[in-house]
Image (tube, rainbow, N blue to C red):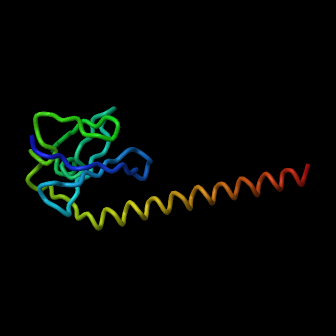
């Protein structure tokens, strides 16, 4: 059986799970798989081109099936460069931390004012 690449969990802007698959056959490239339903994830590039290429993910691991995750994609489905996706994931994580910190500080300020008034 051929080696399968690794998965990294990310989140979409609506906080839905998004898995980034590191390609084995094309080093330096990745494919994005977003949640379709339950444990079934579809390729984002194929979906844009009108085809559904799905993989099954359980506990952040690909369930081995009949096809390799890099097989049977749409002809115009091209993997993304790993460096660009890494930057986007890092940027999203930083913004999430900043957002959480901002809302936490706002809640603390509100509670301090509420206690001061009472």
> Where is the N terminus found, in terms of image quarters?
top left
**Residue drawn at the location 66% of the way across and 54% of the way down:** 104
Q: Quadrant of residue 69?
A: top left
Residue 23 place in picture, x, y as percent: 18, 54
Residue 92 place in picture, x, y as percent: 44, 60
Residue furthest to the right: 118
Residue 61 place in picture, x, y as percent: 29, 40
Q: Quadrant of residue 2?
A: top left
Residue 12 place in picture, x, y as percent: 39, 51
**Along the line of sight, which residue is nearer the eye, 76 or 101?**
101
From the viewer's perspective, tell me whether residue 77 is left or right of residue 17: left
**Along the line of sight, which residue is nearer the eye, 37 or 82?**
82
**Along the line of sight, which residue is nearer the eye, 20 or 48?**
20
**Residue drawn at the location 89% of the way across and 54% of the way down:** 116
**Residue drawn at the location 11% of the way across and 38% of the way down:** 67
**Residue drawn at the location 77% of the way across and 54% of the way down:** 110
């Amino acid at each position: 059986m051929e080696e399968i690449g690794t998965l990294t969990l990310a989140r979409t802007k609506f906080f839905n799970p998004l898995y980034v698959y590191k390609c084995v056959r094309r080093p330096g490239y990745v494919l994005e798989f977003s949640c379709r339903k339950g444990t079934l994830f579809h390729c984002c590039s194929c979906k844009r081109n009108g085809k559904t290429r799905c993989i099954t993910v359980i506990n952040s691991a690909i369930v081995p099936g009949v096809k390799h995750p890099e097989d049977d994609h749409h002809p115009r489905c091209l993997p993304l460069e790993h460096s660009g996706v890494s930057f986007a994931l890092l940027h999203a994580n930083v913004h999430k931390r900043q957002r959480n910190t901002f809302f936490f500080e706002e809640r603390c300020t509100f509670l301090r004012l509420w206690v001061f008034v009472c």
